Image (spheres, helix red, strand yellow):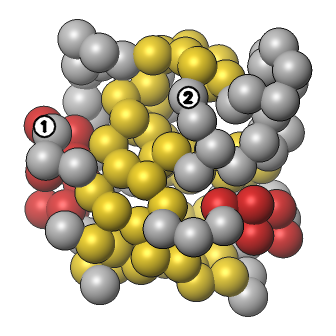
Amino acid sequence: MNIIISVENVSMKAEVFDTPTGRAILSALPFESSANVWGDEVYFDIPIKMDPEPDAKETVAVGDLGYWPVGSAFCIFFGPTPVSQGDTPRAYSPVNVFGRIIGDAKLFKQAGAGSLVRVAKA
């Protein structure tokens, strides 16, 4: 299923995978939160509590959507973070990758800390 993520002047479609985390996020939609920025990652609190899935990982791809169990946060990766080695996005600790941006995820670079983020079904 697809969702729409909107922050600042950016509104992008994303695919949500059929995983436990993906299904939990879809069932909680729609939601709004305040953006945090950490390098080339936007993350925000969401009303879901999930454990790390068996395939949770720190190294992800540009455009991946991850759920960070430690902070109950939805993460959008669009470039390197402060713990990256090179240009590959890297989460602070393992995330459940549950989806992928359709299009140029680097557009989220426009998002500022404190921006309102809206996530809804497409």
Q: Secondary structure at mark 2?
A: loop
Give the alpha-carbon distance from disc 1 to disc 2, as whole Å.
18 Å
Observer-side mark, 1 or 2, equals: 2
N-terminal label among 1 and 2: 1
Residue in the image at 73% along x and 88% along y:
9
Q: Is residue 87 left or right of residue 78?
A: right
Q: Is residue 83 left or right of residue 90?
A: right
For label 2, count other residues whose C-alpha is less than 10 Å away and answer few (under 14), some (14-19) or many (20+): many
Residue 67 position by quadrant = top left
Q: Position of residue 79 (x, y in %)?
A: 77, 42
Give the residue at mark 1.
20
Task: Count up the numbered dots.
Answer: 2
Q: Secondary structure at mark 1?
A: helix
Q: Quadrant of the C terminus?
A: bottom left
Q: Quadrant of the N terminus?
A: bottom left
Q: Is residue 120 left or right of residue 12?
A: left
Residue in the image at 13% along x and 47% along y:
18
For label 1, count other residues whose C-alpha is less than 10 Å away and answer few (under 14), some (14-19) or many (20+): few
* Identity, as a three-letter code, of the amino acid under mark 2: Val
The disc label shown at residue 60, or none: 2
Q: Position of residue 109 (x, y in %)?
A: 82, 62
Question: Does residue 5 appear in this view?
Answer: no
Q: Position of residue 111 (x, y in %)?
A: 78, 68
Residue in the image at 84% along x and 39% along y:
39
Question: Does residue 33 appear in this view?
Answer: yes
Depth check, front residue: 67 or 114 = 67
* Identity, as a three-letter code, of the amino acid under mark 1: Pro
Where is 11 relative to 28, above or below?
A: below
Depth check, front residue: 57 or 6 = 57
